[in-house]
Image (tube, rainbow, N blue to C red):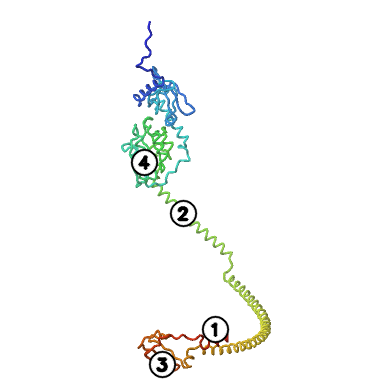
Amino acid sequence: MSLPLLETEEEAPLTVSELVGLVGGTLEREFSHLLVLGELTSMSRAGSGHCYFTLSDGHSSVDAVLWRADALRLAFRPEIGDEVVCRGRMSVFARQGRMQFYVSAMKPVGAGAAQRALVELRRRLAAEGLFAAERKRPLPYLPRTIGVVTSRRGAALHDIVITLRRRFAGVHVVLASAVVQGAEAPRQIVRALEMLTEYGACDVVIVGRGGGASEDLAAFNDEKVVRAVAGFPVPIVSAVGHEVDVSLCDLVADHRAATPTAAAEAVVPVRGELLVELATASHRLHASARRLVVSLRDHVDAVGGRLRDPATALAQSRQAIDRIEMGLERALRRRLHEAARDLDGVTRAFLEAGRTRSAAARARTQAAATTLDRAMRARLAGRAGRLVALASKLDALSPLAVLGRGYSLAERADGTLVRSAAELQIGETLSLRFHAGRAQAQVMWRSPVEVVPEQGTPGSQEAEDTGEER
């Protein structure tokens, strides 16, 4: 018996990893969006938060995994035996080469599973503190605008409006219509609350519907609706079903009413009762004011009886003031007499010291004046002699003195002096200045030879003899 050929030159074998990769890729392409119905026959939770379980239908089973992030979004806590619908994709766990269903969302099937999901959601919301009593806000005493979230066609709206008109006619009602049961109800209720938030004028809001089966109230157990009620900016009254039905919306609201009618009664008082209370309060206020006035009048009378006659008290006060005034006048006169006596003594001492200092100052001033006069006279005599000597020297050096000895000065028409015959032009007119008077002359002739003045001039020897500068 011959063995089959395991290898040829045209065909190469796949590795295990390549095989698993091909199978996984095919599964992910072909089975990327699946809804699978099955029963949880095994369930384990890892410390990381991931859930590993098996889905079975009695004939076949498949391993599945739910990652931690997706598990935290579940509205219930899955347990073994639950029938669930899972959304996910098929792939292969490469390490073991095992086909595995990767779940991204899970929802229970059946009444028992739905109840467990509701209990789990209630536990989780309570852990967040959404049902805490300290979060409850008081309802406004007399709201001007009331918002209502319910069905436009339901009996709840009629009951609310009729009750509000009966109790306090004229209050403003704003309806944000929404269906209150069915798959579309949660989204519409949330949107209605958003519309009232955008409207912004409501003082209080009623959310509710009439009675019905438990499954009809499911919209008010939806997590999105509960969180929308919890985050609403003004107080909310929940009126869902009847007294025996308690929804999560009832637990998170600021006030719970058994019926829509009870909700309307909770948000507004009765106008007639308010008028009666106002009249009663007004009567009590007037009565209290009268009692207070009487009490104060009696107190004034009692105090007045203990007071002295104002005229007597005033006379005594005047006498006391007169005594004080006379005492002050005597003390002031005595003080003025003492001050005048002290002032006389100080004045005499000051005048005596002034006379002594004045005589000494006059003597010193007289001596200084005599010394100054002698010094000034001597100084003036010396200065006068020097002035005479300098005047004599100045006169000797003056050009006018030279003219007095018979010399003259020749000036051109522009006033410049002629210093050399070589500067003159034949026929030029000159002005001659003498010691006494002037005359005009015309150049008729000039010497061809320039005369050089002799060394030294009159008065130079005198300057040398006196040692003074010229």
Crowdedness near tag 1: few (<14), some (14–19) or many (≥20) residues, C-alpha within 10 Å: few
In depth, the one of 8 and 448 nearer the eye is 448
User: Tag 3: residue type?
Assistant: Arg
Disc nearer the start of the sequence (1/4)? 4
The residue indicated by pointer 4 is 194
The x, y position of residue 434, in whole percent, is 44, 92
Q: CA distance from mark 2 to mark 1?
A: 123 Å
Left-right relation of 68 to 466:
left
Q: Is residue 34 visible?
A: no
The x, y position of residue 354, in whole percent, is 66, 83
Number of marks = 4
User: Tag 4: residue type?
Assistant: Glu
Q: Secondary structure at mark 1?
A: loop
Q: Secondary structure at mark 3?
A: strand
Disc nearer the start of the sequence (3/1)? 3
Q: From the image, state whether disc 2 or disc 1 is nearer to you.
A: 1
Q: CA distance from mark 1 to mark 4?
A: 118 Å
Q: CA distance from mark 4 to mark 3?
A: 126 Å
Crowdedness near tag 4: few (<14), some (14–19) or many (≥20) residues, C-alpha within 10 Å: some
Above or below, comparing residue 427 to residue 129 in the picture: below
Disc nearer the start of the sequence (2/4)? 4
* Mark drawn on residue 285: 2
